[in-house]
Image (cartoon, helix red, strand yellow):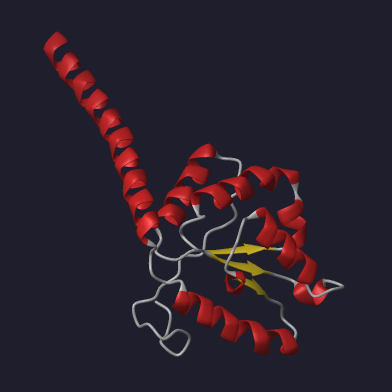
């Protein structure tokens, strides 16, 4: 749970997940399932990881899967950037087809950045914390496909056990 002093809602909690760049397919599927089923999603990027070719597929997936969901994007390490991530923000907005620029927040650890990005982040989380109707349908379809996939596996295993019992 996130304390109410951080966010206005008392029913807010966060799940911190490592990056999508993990190589294990089962790990990626677990992370993607968590992201798709979440009410609000926050993606963190630094300019180096965003630009990596290995992340291109993930960026495309995020852009396609979450275009209705309105996730928040936090661009890290602005205090290490010559232009404080201003050009990086424009790139993310363009590549991810973001129309609500207040969902893209430049972050950093310097005092001037902290006093700016924390209120922006709180406001974005509050504003975009409700699941969009179109995305709710996508969530239910995704859960349905997972259930069918798992149910198919379980049925196959049960059939194998029945066959084993009948043969013995």
Eyeballing the image, is 18 above or below 61? below
In the picture, measured across the screen, residue 21 lies left or right of residue 29, that is right
The answer to whether residue 21 of the structure is visible from this angle is no
Eyeballing the image, is 149 above or below 140? above
Q: Residue at x 41, y 73 (%)?
A: 13
In the picture, measured across the screen, residue 31 lies left or right of residue 49, that is left
Q: Residue at x 75, y 49 (%)?
A: 52
Report the number of discs. Answer: 0
Eyeballing the image, is 166 above or below 131? above
Q: Residue at x 33, y 44 (%)?
A: 141
| Residue 126 x, y percent position in the rendering | 45, 79
Q: Residue at x 38, y 69 (%)?
A: 130
| Residue 88 x, y percent position in the rendering | 76, 64
Eyeballing the image, is 42 above or below 28? below
The answer to whether residue 70 of the structure is visible from this angle is yes
Q: Dividing the image into 4 quarters, which one contains the N terminus?
A: bottom left
In the picture, measured across the screen, residue 83 lies left or right of residue 156, that is right
Residue 11 falls in image quadrant:
bottom left
Task: Give the residue at the far left of this rendering.
Answer: 166
Towards the viewer: 112 or 164: 112
Task: Give the residue at the far right of this rendering.
Answer: 82
Task: Give the residue at the far top of this rendering.
Answer: 167
| Residue 7 x, y percent position in the rendering | 45, 84
| Residue 80 x, y percent position in the rendering | 82, 73
Q: Dividing the image into 4 quarters, which one contains the C terminus?
A: top left
In the picture, measured across the screen, residue 122 lies left or right of residue 106, that is left
């Amino acid at each position: 749970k996130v304390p109410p002093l951080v966010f206005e809602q008392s029913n807010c909690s966060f799940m911190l997940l490592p990056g999508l760049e993990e190589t294990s397919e089962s790990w990626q599927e677990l992370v993607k399932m968590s992201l798709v089923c979440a009410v609000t999603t926050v993606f963190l990027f630094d300019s180096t990881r965003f630009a990596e070719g290995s992340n291109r597929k993930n960026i495309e997936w995020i852009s396609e899967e979450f275009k209705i969901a309105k996730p928040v994007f936090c661009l890290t390490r602005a205090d290490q950037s010559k232009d404080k991530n201003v050009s990086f923000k424009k790139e993310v907005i363009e590549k991810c087809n973001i129309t609500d620029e207040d969902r893209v927040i430049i972050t950093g650890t310097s005092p001037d950045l902290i006093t700016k990005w924390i209120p922006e982040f709180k406001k974005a989380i509050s504003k975009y914390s409700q699941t969009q109707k179109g995305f709710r349908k996508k969530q239910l379809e995704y859960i349905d496909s997972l259930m069918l996939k798992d149910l198919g596996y379980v049925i196959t295993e049960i059939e194998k056990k029945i066959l084993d019992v009948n043969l013995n």
